[in-house]
Amino acid sequence: MARFIDASGKRRNRSTRSTLRKEAQKIADTFEKAAQKNNTIKQLRKVVSELHKEISGEEIPAQTVKDFSDAWLAKKNPEVSPSTHAFYKTLVGKFLIFLEQKAAAPMTDLTAEDIVNFRNHLVKSLSSRTVNHNLKGLKMLFKAAKQDRVISEDPSEFVTSTKKAPKKPRHPFTVDELKKLIAVADEEWKSMIRFGLYTGQRLGDIAKIKWGDIDLERGRIRLVTQKTSKSLVLPIAQPLKTHLQSLKKNQTPEAPIHQTSFGIIAKQGRTANLSNRFSDLLAKAGLQEKKSHSKKGTSAGRHGARASAGLGFHCLRHTAVTMLQEAGIPLAVVMEIAGHDSEQMSHHYTHVGDEALQKAASSLPVI
């Protein structure tokens, strides 16, 4: 039996579970050492590990950064969307590469300095917004480690985000700009642009639309937005309906309308490649300077920060909203078409009917 006084002055009795006096004495000394200091779990684990190694000659296995990260990714897989899981997987991969040999160290060995160094490493090659998004994802990893009691202290808790650079404001396309864009686009991009203008939806959502989502008889498009998971039933404006009728030739419900773009999204899980292709199209139309899509800096290579995009596909969304508002369409109808959520508007308990939606869609000009 080991008898010792803890940090509060209370007498403690603990069995060493050993009949060997020398071994029991070492265990008792360890009990006393741990009890008389305000140790963290990390420090206690180190003391116990050293004792175990001294007595048995073997080290206590600890969960490494890589092992826990792999287990966390597997756990998150059914809990989040495929695109979110792909983001977590990429982030963890970058973090493990940055840690080098420390990736094989116990989770308890990581410090706030490691997180700060990783954040500062990302700052050299990514925009502040992307860095902060990565930092937020990494904090999720360490929060899970603390919840699972793998660590007692979260080293990322007080690591702050970087200062955001001012965003370049987007502006809607003019009708003339849209005509120039359509003139130089291939058939798929012509279709994507029409969908962007006449539905007001985001690039990724448009790329994933299948023929089964289209009801030409009723003049409706059904989709679930990736960003907000909101189910939308949108009216088909007549110019878009005419375009779809020209495309539909014995298409199966599962067939994507925009096959190339659908394939890119399915393979990569994000819209960066499509955004770059649209940027090239803008340059071809003379609406912006040609971008190389290489990163800023002479040595940044593919991992550098992209220059500010200016015009982009998302501007078609702004164009649709602007044109609807200029046509005198009520704000609630505009928001329903764009799929916007607003706490202020929800207080009105406004229900937007099919007739109002169709009238709104009909107000958009033919491009």
Image (cartoon, rainbow, N blue to C red):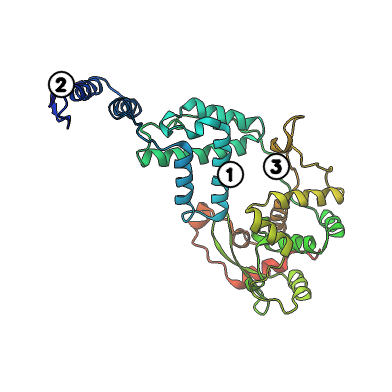
| Residue in the image at 74% along x and 30% along y | 299
Residue at image x 84%, y 43%?
A: 290
Residue sitting nearer the eye, 197 or 67: 67
Q: Residues within 10 Å of mark 2 (few under 14, many from 20)?
A: some
Q: Is residue 8 visible?
A: yes
The residue that label 1 is drawn on is 90
Residue 361, image x and y in percent? 69, 67
Residue assigned mark 2? 4
Q: Is residue 287 left or right of residue 352?
A: right
Could you classify mark 3 by the number of other residues whose Cα lies within 10 Å: few (under 14), some (14-19), or many (20 or more)?
A: few
Q: Earlier in the sequence, mark 1 or mark 3?
A: 1
Query: Which amino acid type is shown beneath numbered disc 3?
Result: Pro
Q: In the image, what residue type sits under mark 2? A: Phe
Relative placement, left or right, of 188 versus 151 is right
Marks 2/3: CA distance? 68 Å
Sequence order check, earlier mark of 2 and 3: 2
Name above or below for residue 94 compared with residue 243.
above
The answer to whether marks 2 and 3 mark residues whose Cβ atoms lie closer than 8 Å is: no
Q: Which residue is mark 3?
A: 169
The alpha-carbon separation of the residues under discs 2 and 1 comes to 50 Å
Q: Secondary structure at mark 1?
A: helix
| Circle 2: element type | strand
Q: How many marks?
A: 3
Dot placed on the residue nearer the N-terminal end, 2 or 1: 2
Quadrant in the picture for the C terminus: bottom right
Q: Is residue 328 visible?
A: no
- Under circle 3, the secondary element is loop
